[in-house]
Every structure is written in C-alpha cells, then in structure tokens.
Image (spheres, helix red, strand yellow):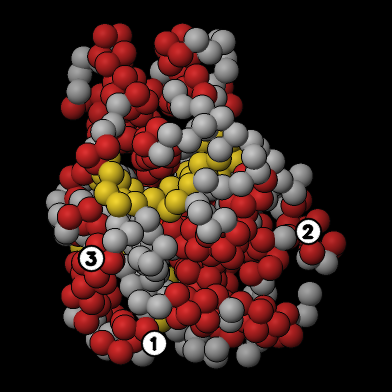
Amino acid sequence: MKPTVPGPTYREMLHPEVLPPAVRNRALAAGSDELDPIHLFNITWRGPNRQIRHIVLPTELTGVPANIIVMVGRNFPSGSHKVGPAYATLMEGELAGEISPAANTVIGPSTGNFGIGVAYISRLKGYPAIVIMPEGMSKERYARIRQYGGELDLTPGSESDVILVLERTEHYKKDPKNKVLAQFELLPNYRFHRFVTGRSALESAAGHGNGRVAAFVSAPGSAGTIAAGDEIKASFPDSVICALEPKECSTLFNNGRGTHRIEGIGDKMVTLIHTVLTTDYVMQIHDDDCVIGLELLERRRAMVESLTGLHAGALTGIEGVFGVSGLCNIIGAIRLARHLKLGAGDNVVTIATDGFDRYPSVLADLAQRRAPIDDAKLRAWFETVFRGGTSADILDVRPPAEKQRLFTYKEDVWSQFGYKHDYLEQMKSQSFWDAEYNRIDGIDRALADSRNL
Ligand SMILES: Cc1ncc(COP(=O)(O)O)c(C=O)c1O
C-alpha cells in the first residue's frame, strides 16, 4: 500500500543521514514553515550536526556526581517527541491499508502532546483529525491543536482522568470511518521508543563518563518513552529502569489514584504497552516540586546559579528547554542517582518531552497560588527540589509479587476495553515484546518499497 505522503522509516528516524541527500537537505532547509510535509523527515532526536540533542546538567545544580543527561524533545516537529509515535502509528496503519485520507478521520486520545502530534501529522498527510483530551490541560495545548486544524473533543477532569478519554474513544470506534491512533494500546509507540529513543539514549551516553547507561528514568503517560529502557537493557543488562509518577496519583507505586499537576504523565492506569517486566523501580514525586522546579530553572536562573556556585550565565543554555514533566524526570534522575549511590562517570539518562512554550500559564497559576514568591521561599524551594527526596518514595518493583500486582492492574483496565486474557498473558513474557520489536525491519522494507523518494 502506498503511503499518502511519504515519510521516514524507523531507521531513518534514528539515522536521518541515511536519507537520500536531496530529501535530507530539503528537510534541513525547510525552516520555520512547520506545515511543509518535508518536516516528516525531521522526526528524529538528531540535530543538523547529526548529534543527539541532549544536555548534561552541571553537577553543581544536581548535587550528585553522576552525569544527569537529558535528551531534548522540543525540537521535534510540533514541539515534542510525541510526534514520533503519532507518525509511526499512522504510517503503520497506512502501510497495512487500513487508513487513507479519502476514507478516514484520525482520532487521537491524549492529554496533549500526542494530540498535538496527531493533529500535526494528520494535517501534513491530509487527514481530518479529532483530538480527545481532558478539559483541564494547559491552554497552550488546545491552541496548538487548533492551529494545526485539529478538532477538539474535551472530556471532564484533568491529567489523571484519561480513562474518560478512553471511554469517549470507544464511542468513536463505532463508526468505521474513524481510525484511532491509540497510543496507550498500539505497539508502534513501543517500536518507536524502543528503537529510536532507546538507541538515541545509548548514543547520547556514549560520549560521557564511562560511556554506559547506569539508569534510565521516565515518567510514563502512555509508557511509550520508557520502552527505551528495553533497548538500554539489551546493551547494559545491569542498567536500572525507573518509572516516575506524581505522589498525588501513585498508581504504579501502590494502586493510588488522584488528580495532579504534571501534564502528560500519571494517567491512573498501567497502560497496555507498558512492558512492566523491565521496570525496576517506581518513584513518587510531588507534583508541585516539578512546577516550582520549572519556576526555578525557567525564571530564577540567576538565583540558582548563585546558590549553587555556578558562574553567572552558566544556565543560560537551558532556557525554554524544559516543561513540567521534564522537571519531574530531572528530579527523578537526581534522586535515583543519589539512592543508587552512583558515582562520577556513571550516566543517568532521562527525557524532556517538550519545552517551556506549553507552560507559561502553569507558572502564572503558580504565581497566584503560592504568592508571595520571595527569596527565602525560593531558597527553600531549591532545597526541596534539588536536594530533597527520600528513599521511602522509591519502590523496588523487581520482586515477582510487585510484577504480578502491576500485571493485575493492567488486566483490570484493559479487559474492560475488550482485551482477552490470552493476549494479556502473552505480554508477561519478554519474547512478546521482542517479537513486536523485531517487526521493525519488515515495516521499514515495506515502507521503503512503497515510496518513491
Ligand atoms: C509532557 C509529557 N511528558 C511526558 C509524557 C509521557 O510520555 P509517554 O506517553 O511516552 O510515556 C507525555 C505524553 O504525552 C507528555 O506529553
């Protein structure tokens, strides 16, 4: 089946330099015209210089000797790496002959960035798109979706009410014209992150410290990104994979549920595509620690520099690079490095899914909620965010009883949506995931054969 508008293979997303030079050069030159479909070929962690975009945080800031390496997602087209799984899911559907712009509307269940990615990819490929998401997300998210021509269908509640989004999605599924890019369920999300993000993470660590990855830390929403951990473990079996979640909604930690402020993560469920097997630890982090951490790094850098002994301007390069979940990942990476007593030369890799452009309204809200924000308060916030945390918030989920608890949670959620016991049982074996991963070569060949680049 011929794709509607050709885009990259998985391998080309990892290594865009293998694209035909004319295509690669056009993609690099496309610049600020976001809606030029050539931008599909810019879905990659790599910058124009071929390096994986990442930042190593100064140890003065982190307070730990290990390298905290943050991969930067905001330079992906549409402003977050979530466009990758959105593209991969649509691309695989097109290749399978299941979806075409003349016949179908694309449905994107989301809490924001995946929805933005769906609206964006749909626009580039000529599909109408409807994004289903909670009504309580940042207003910057809705604006982006509308800007790309996506229609919004809002469900009650906020981040942790994603189950309502899934229920609304079931309603759309009844009309065969609607094709759902189901990020919580479909394995292109797993494939994209295990292959593209996982190998990019390995490469970003290769240039630092001992070149290995001691730990990978990710706060799951769909649990796509954390699949990078499967690839990291394939290279470094001793590496530790840690899932983070808001203390206010500690589903993986202790089946807890609640509302919270970290948009994009903590969705009150074990998603279908969460491997579970390779997750070693779960850590809880207070949601407002992430919001005040963003305030410190985005608005109070001069003060943070002076508190940590960094020279003036040392943190200028991080301006605009992080969102709230990025702060969650940074805080989690620091606390895990401390908990595991990692030393100089050890690398902890994590992710900044999106940048600050989606969060000015969140900091405006913080300014109102926590006023007055004076120097004493900022100093206390710094201590809490960058030097705080307790081992009591870190749970080892390697014991079989913990794995079983997570599998049971998964089964409880997904049997409601029609998934059969047998399929869910297969997911308890790593061979299920490896087989899904091993489909990448065949998919890439089929895509390459169907294109005329
Ligand atoms: C801002 C943000 N951070 C983190 C995540 C979690 O990523 P994943 O869905 O791959 O687990 C998302 C997902 O939408 C997100 O939008």
Using the image, determine if residue 37 lies above or below residue 107: above
How far apart are the two marked residues, 1 and 3, measured between alpha carbons?
43 Å
How far apart are the two marked residues, 2 and 1, measured between alpha carbons?
37 Å
Residue in the picture at 43% in, 34% down: 341
Question: Which element type, helix, strand or loop, lies under badge 1?
Answer: loop
Which label was assigned to residue 26?
none
Circle nearer the viewer, 2 or 1? 2
Q: Quadrant of residue 338?
A: top left
Question: Which element type, helix, strand or loop, lies under badge 2?
Answer: helix
* Residue 89 makes an appearance in the image: no
The number of discs equals: 3
Q: Are marks 1 and 3 in contact (CB under 8 Å)?
A: no
Which label was assigned to residue 401?
3
Using the image, determine if residue 143 lies above or below residue 126: above
Q: Pick whichever of labels 2 and 1 is earlier in the sequence.
A: 2
Kindly identify the amino acid type of the residue bearing the numbered disc 2.
Answer: Glu
Kindly identify the amino acid type of the residue bearing the numbered disc 3.
Answer: Ala
Residue 365 x %, y %? 25, 31
Check mark 2 vs ligand 1: CB closer than 8 Å? yes or no.
no
How far apart are the two marked residues, 3 and 2, measured between alpha carbons?
45 Å
Residue in the picture at 27% in, 16% down: 380
Quadrant of the frame with the N terminus? bottom right
Residue highlighted by disc 1 = 177
Left or right: 48, with 322 as reference point: right
Foreground residue among 425 and 84:
425
Which label was assigned to residue 17?
2
